[in-house]
Amino acid sequence: MSYNKFHFLNSFKIEKNKFIFNIDSKKDNFLLLRFPYDKNWKIKIDGKESIYLRANKYWLGIPLYENGKKRLVLEYS
């Protein structure tokens, strides 16, 4: 991805049923993804399971409580 208005997303790739993001946040953030909210998502940040929320009625929202570089993995099962 070349467009990164907020300098937040470093890289993104897709593997089978996984979406992998490498992000770098300068402060606490809330990541809004235009992926449909569903209870079958499994989300890990740096290998640890993370919570996610329904955002704007339909989308997936992930709170990022600590700044710095992170690896975010979304898996649908």
Image: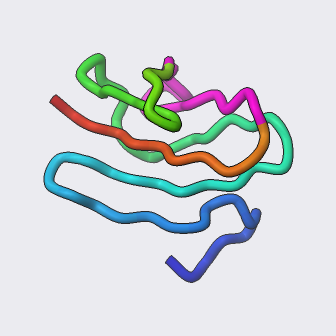
Q: Residue furthest right?
A: 27
Q: Which residue is at 76% across, 63% downward?
A: 6
In reply to whether residue 52 is colored magenta, the answer given is yes
Q: Nearer the viewer, residue 44 or 55?
A: 44
| Quarter of image, res 13 | bottom left
Q: Identify whether 61 is placed above or below 50.
A: below
Q: Identify whether 51 is placed above or below 4.
A: above
Q: Residue furthest bottom?
A: 2
Q: Which residue is at 22% across, 34% downward?
A: 76
| Quarter of image, res 28 | top right
In reply to whether residue 3 is colored magenta, the answer given is no
Horizontal side, residue 61 vs residue 73: left or right? right
Q: Nearer the viewer, residue 46 or 73?
A: 46
Q: How many marks?
A: 0
- Looking at the picture, how far across and down is residue 59, in whole percent? 45, 34
Q: Identify whether 19 is placed above or below 6.
A: above
Q: Nearer the viewer, residue 51 or 68?
A: 68
Quadrant, the C terminus: top left
- Looking at the picture, how far across and down is residue 45, in whole percent? 51, 34
- Looking at the picture, how far across and down is residue 54, in whole percent? 49, 22
Q: Which residue is at 55% across, 28% downward?
A: 55
- Looking at the picture, how far across and down is residue 65, in whole percent? 73, 27
Q: Residue furthest front?
A: 47
- The segment highlighted magenta reads 51-66
Q: Which residue is at 66% across, 71% downward?
A: 4
Indicate how the structure is coloured in the image: rainbow
Q: Nearer the viewer, residue 61 or 19?
A: 19
Q: Identify whether 55 is placed above or below 21.
A: above
Horizontal side, residue 67 vs residue 56: left or right? right
Horizontal side, residue 70 vs residue 75: left or right? right
